[in-house]
Amino acid sequence: MTEWTTTRRGLVVAAGVGLAGCLGSGDDGGNGNSNENGSDDGTEGSTEQVNGVPAGDIEARREQMPDPGVTVDWSDAREFRAWLFDDGNASNGRFDYAEDLPPAEDVESPVLEVLDVYPDQVDALVSQGTTQVVLGQFDADALETQLAESEQYDVTDEYGGYAVADGADETSAGPIAVGDDALVLGTGYENPIDARHGDRDRLEDVDPWMTHVLETLPEEPLVTGEYLEPLVDTIDIPEIYCWGLSMPGRDPETATWAFVFDDPDDITDDVRTELRTLAGEVDDIAVDGRTLTMVGTIPERSEMGQ
């Protein structure tokens, strides 16, 4: 499995979201993506119902959501959004984006033992499911040669214009796909590559509510999005359909949250009170239809789990 992680001080944890912290983990659900509201597909095992369907059945809830009336202008959207893919009910769809990079001394990865690309050639990091996309400007031919000549990797395949290398033995890292615009690490590397090329459903093409979330949030260096309620002990609000968070850097004082609910009537006073616990202090909270936005300070210590 490819492991590209930062040390604890290189990891931002804010209101349940780890950003700029985990690159290249090949562990299933290692990005907080497992759908804990039911079975593997989220459709069984949940006793909670939202609008007559299991709370963890993202696809069924999606079918009941009205059209928010927004579309993506891919020519103008931030680059990372084209790499995000729809995962159906297989996970919570958690994604993290960081263009405020952790310092090199905080990054640990066997990839860097072979490819000397971080941080000079790296622009941003995207993590979703079991894959991480390292965006930048690379010499793909040179990187392929370095992988082939290393003891840690064997170049075994080509996929979507990217050379694919696997670990040379069970203790080595892998897989990794290298191209001129990105390195794609981890099992399931095909998913973001296919989304980038338009060969599978992009997240926002399937669900305009995620477009709504991303365009409601400020355009900041750190962004997270996810379906269902945050996996946080203090939050028990199954009526949250999806949500997002943005922050101005790795050591922020404030953050902006956006929550979308299945029904505007779900945003009760009790729900507002519960969501306020995500912030140290709430500077602003507003409701527009089925969307609640909140701006607040980051708690000094947060146990709001990954």
Image (cartoon, helix red, strand yellow):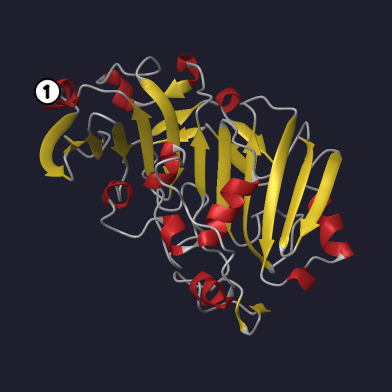
Q: Is residue 54 above or below residue 127?
A: below
Horizontal and vertical percent position of residue 205: 42, 59
Which quarter of the image is occupied by the N terminus?
Answer: top left
Q: Residues within 10 Å of mark 1 (few under 14, many from 20)?
A: few
Name the residue located 30 percent from the left edge and 32 percent from the top edge.
182
In the image shown, does 249 or 175 lie closer to the viewer? 249
Left-right relation of 284 to 107 = right
- The quarter holding residue 124 reads top left
In the image shown, does 217 or 71 lie closer to the viewer? 71
Left-right relation of 207 to 75 = right
Left-right relation of 112 to 275 = left
SS at badge 1? helix
Horizontal and vertical percent position of residue 104: 45, 16
Left-right relation of 198 to 274 = left
Q: Is residue 306 visible?
A: no
Horizontal and vertical percent position of residue 286: 81, 52
- Mark 1 sits on what residue? 145
Q: Residue lying farthest bottom?
A: 52
Q: Is residue 305 above or below residue 60?
A: above
- The quarter holding residue 282 reads top right
Name the residue located 83 percent from the left edge and 38 percent from the top edge.
280
Q: Name the amino acid, label 1.
A: Thr
Name the residue located 50 percent from the left edge and 17 percent from the top edge.
103
